[in-house]
Amino acid sequence: MSRLIELADAEIIPHIRIDGGTPLFEAKETKKWVANSLIQRYEGKELPFNLRVVSERPLADKLNIPKPLKEIEGLQDITDVLDLRSGIYFLFLNDDVVYVGQSIKVSSRIHEHVYVKDFNRVLFMKWPKSDLDRIEGALIRDIKPKLNYTKQGFLLGTGNPDNDEVVLSLIKSSVL
């Protein structure tokens, strides 16, 4: 309801006000407006490899994702429910990616980070465990999150750096 009032205050959604009071909505008209104005349908595309569904979490809001990750399709916000399995995860502190990691049981791995890393949001990209090393390494070297550095100042990352450009382009086009 608060979203409807916000839209009414911005004079976006159809509504009526009696003597400048709280906006009132006609159910049929509001449902029609929402269906025409807010709902988007995506047919999806065929996966280029065999995967099993590990979560039905909503996709992360593209408006709140930092630039280095905006082109990656399929990121899921799992901050509130960490029950996904194999994939790459991104720990955020506000709007900054502070750590990139991988796990075959991501909920347990992120739970380990809670007590040693400062973060307040998690995004997740499900991925088969056979590709985790090269994808994690390429993303770490591309994003350079501050918690992926050693105390000596070396950036940690697995996989072959010579293949990073190809791996990153494949991730962004979802062709792996």
Image: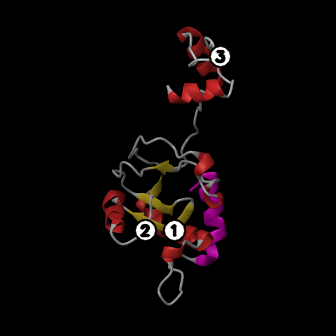
**Res 52 seen here:** yes
Q: Which stretch appears magenta? A: 161-176
Residue bearing the label numbered 2 = 118
**Residue at horizontal 66%, vertical 60%?**
169
Earlier-in-chain disc, 1 versus 3: 3
Q: Nearer the viewer, mark 1 or mark 3?
A: 3
Residue bearing the label numbered 3 = 14
Q: Nearer the viewer, mark 1 or mark 2?
A: 2
Question: Is 112 in the magenta?
Answer: no
Earlier-in-chain disc, 1 versus 2: 1
x, y (%) of residue 74?
Answer: 54, 48
Tally of marks: 3
Dot 3 alpha-carbon crowd within 10 angstroms: few under 14, some 14 to 19, many 20 or more: some
**Residue at horizontal 57%, vertical 59%?**
95
Residue placed most toward the observer, 93 or 60: 93
x, y (%) of residue 145?
Answer: 55, 71
Q: Which kind of residue does numbered mark 1 sit on?
A: Val
Residue lying at the far bottom of the rendered structure: 152
Q: Are discs 2 and 3 less than 8 Å apart at CB?
A: no
x, y (%) of residue 97?
Answer: 54, 64
Residue bearing the label numbered 1 = 98
Q: Which kind of residue does numbered mark 3 sit on?
A: Pro
Q: Secondary structure at mark 1?
A: strand
Q: Secondary structure at mark 3?
A: loop
Q: Which kind of residue does numbered mark 2 sit on?
A: Asp
